[in-house]
Image (spheres, coloured by chain):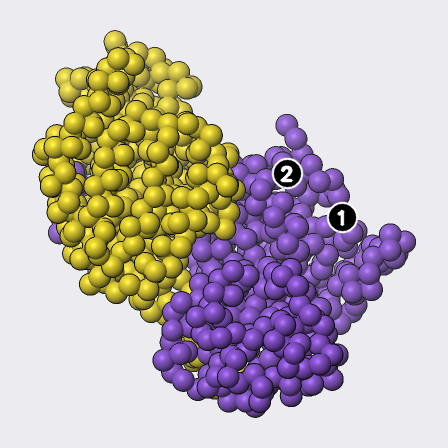
Chain colours: A purple, B yellow
Amino acid sequence: MSTVRELALKAKSASRQLAVLDTEAKNEALKAMAQQLLADAETILRANEIDLNNGQAAGLSPALLDRLALTPARIGDMVEGIRQVASLKDPVGEVIESWVRPNGLEIAKVRVPMGVIGMVYEARPNVTVDTCALCLKAGSAVLLRGSASALNSNRALVSSIKKGLSGTAVPVDAVQFVDTGDRGAVDEMLRLNGLLDLVIPRGGAGLIRRVVETATVPVIETGVGNCHVYVDKDADPQMALDIILNAKCQRYGVCNAAETLLVHRSIAPSWLPGAVRELTAAGVEVRGCPETVKLIPGVTPATESDYATEFLAPILAVRIVEDLAQALEHIQTYGTGHSETIVTADEATAAEFLQRVDAAAVYHNASTRFTDGFQYGFGAEIGISTQKLHARGPMGLKEITSYKYVVKGTGQIRS
Amino acid sequence: MSTVRELALKAKSASRQLAVLDTEAKNEALKAMAQQLLADAETILRANEIDLNNGQAAGLSPALLDRLALTPARIGDMVEGIRQVASLKDPVGEVIESWVRPNGLEIAKVRVPMGVIGMVYEARPNVTVDTCALCLKAGSAVLLRGSASALNSNRALVSSIKKGLSGTAVPVDAVQFVDTGDRGAVDEMLRLNGLLDLVIPRGGAGLIRRVVETATVPVIETGVGNCHVYVDKDADPQMALDIILNAKCQRYGVCNAAETLLVHRSIAPSWLPGAVRELTAAGVEVRGCPETVKLIPGVTPATESDYATEFLAPILAVRIVEDLAQALEHIQTYGTGHSETIVTADEATAAEFLQRVDAAAVYHNASTRFTDGFQYGFGAEIGISTQKLHARGPMGLKEITSYKYVVKGTGQIRS
């Protein structure tokens, strides 16, 4: 029997104990976990330093090294995150719907834990802690597979988490960690049908594609966001400016940042030059369609592939479109179904945009940056789904549960 | 470009028109479809005869030939089925939840069509018609792949359906049919990421396994049911007898039929011999554990593999268990997470069973045969999910939709 399968078997077995725990018991365990992480902060930081040194030696970019780095403050944030999850409503046991059939059968649709959730993720070690907190609270065991570059940090975090859980009602085996940088282990994990009820990949487009192509267990795709801001002819110019600046510049490396600006032809001459000036002043490189380049000398011409790119960087593609229909067509062609917004004062135009755009989150007069579990009020987020199955958009506790039908009878048989 | 991809592209394009149609328009199209099927009944029956003759020549079993066969009455049932779907509530556009954030953002979680649904199914041609009706009503286009043995029947049905749709608001291209018995076409279909939003396999365990192993698009597994009836020590003897006879014998070839009977040791001597007598009288072959064989001379000994088998036939495995814990362990080991029932007058025992059994549907004092979209009051059924992602148990219209977040602002940006 292989190691990854063994870990999953332990998780499966633990998930059965975990599934029937009450909220109090799970919250106690989360608090113990938080306490232990604080106590182990120094050990964790030392382990992180090994990863950082290895990363530097391997030539990781400063951005990646920053994502990898832990500090006492970041550990404090993780601990605070766990305590927040403890304070959230337990989704398990909720009666989603219930009804009585004419034959007297009482049917209840009851929220239940998923079972064992696999997480395959890159870089940031805080995902290790967030995932454990969210999955345990939602009653599921977890099998973690972080990136090789964070192996020492993740190992130290998991070891502390397990120490925290020991002595609580949550079985220590509910948290399992694939302690190897070997890629074969991921492939094996992705094919543990019957043991893993769900795998969530979190990371870049390459990781997500590899998981989708390899997995035979159910997967929820997350994250890739080629998001658009469409400035309609009836847009309030100042609002449009505020929104594109926020959607593009508030943070570059996130999936809900805007990557392409679409502008209605009739507002372009009056609005676009000023907007490009402000974007450029903010440090953004603008790449424009031929019409944009003609309108604003000095703008770099955009290529077809610019429209298809999730830059995650201070680069913005700009295209002037004839009308709403062309904007919709552009989004349909290049969008990844993540977050799309229209800026307009015309309610009918907005309604058509909101209805026709096929994305997890569609906005009217607001920044795409709001697609986020915390911003939506979920209190937590395990990822943002860009697929249509199971969960779409920000995923909180509820989105990592399943349900079952509980049916009570008095001897009913089927005729 | 390959043929299957071309079909899917057409379906995808049609799905965008279909997604924004109102209920009235979809119902009109369903009624036109029903009308046309009636008008084409003779052509359809002739096509079915070719399949039946081919099937006979190929040595298909009488049971399979019966599943394949169409009659005027069966066509009438399909037509009636379409009309019933037309009368069901349209799930699309339902506001599942809505709330306002402290910053004034209005967030609505709105039910939307899935997009394009692929169906890979075996034998029964009525699945062709049911699937079209359900998917179109739920606003999704459909790509159909029936079995080679029903190729002529399905081709005639699809041709009639498309004729019925022409002249209605539902685009004819919303129904696509993979018109080949070639298996490579299925594999291609299962990897159309970005074009197929969901694939549902309906058929035997082999088909479902192949789909799960091959697909890179999201899949909902359906159907395999190794279901148990557990007769507790506190069971009402007559109720227990009625339920096992119904769960085993009311129909053999269905996924919600019982395949194994578990009996508490303390009720076995008084109850089991009579139950086995009745089951045998009903034509069921009983295969028992050593204790059962000792108790009831003449019973065939059960093998380990009998417990793991979905017989779909008049065969029943019987095992005497020590207590509830052993019953739960047996179900955990051999069950497929479909439907499980306990017969007991003890509420505490029932509650523990209902909570601990991890299955799509868990019953107390009722037959497993009720796991069915019609029996649950959904008015329709596209399959029964045995996975935990997206939908579990009977799937009606709602279960083949997705949702999106529609967010309305007044210029909100993220700080």
Residue at x-position 58% and y-position 73%: A319
Residue type (three-letter) at the residue carrying disc 2: Asp
- Front in this rendered view, residue B200 or B272: B200
Give the x, y percent position of residue B182: 41, 27
- Left or right: B148, with B219 as reference point: left
- Left or right: A410, with A321 as reference point: left
Q: Chain of mark 2?
A: A
Residue at x-position 38% and y-position 76%: A351
Residue at x-position 39% and y-position 16%: B303
- Front in this rendered view, residue B202 or A230: A230
Q: Which residue is mark 1?
A: A148
Q: Report whether mark 1 lies on the same chain as mark 2.
A: yes
- Left or right: A380, with B376 as reference point: right
Q: In this rendering, is residue B352 above or below B249?
A: below
Mark yes or no: residue B163 visible: yes
Residue at mark 1 to residue at mark 2: CA–CA distance: 15 Å
Residue type (three-letter) at the residue carrying disc 1: Ala
- Front in this rendered view, residue A411 or A415: A415
Earlier sequence position, callout 1 versus callout 2: 1
Circle 2 packing at 10 Å, graded few (<14), some (14-19), many (20+), is some
Q: Residue furthest top?
A: B298
Quadrant position of the C terminus of chain A in the picture: top left
Residue at x-position 51% and y-position 66%: A331
Quadrant position of the N terminus of chain A in the picture: top right
Mark yes or no: residue B103 visible: no
Give the x, y percent position of residue B338: 35, 38
Q: Which residue is mark 2?
A: A187
Tell me the quarter of the picture where residue B106 sits.
Answer: bottom left
Give the x, y percent position of residue B141: 34, 51
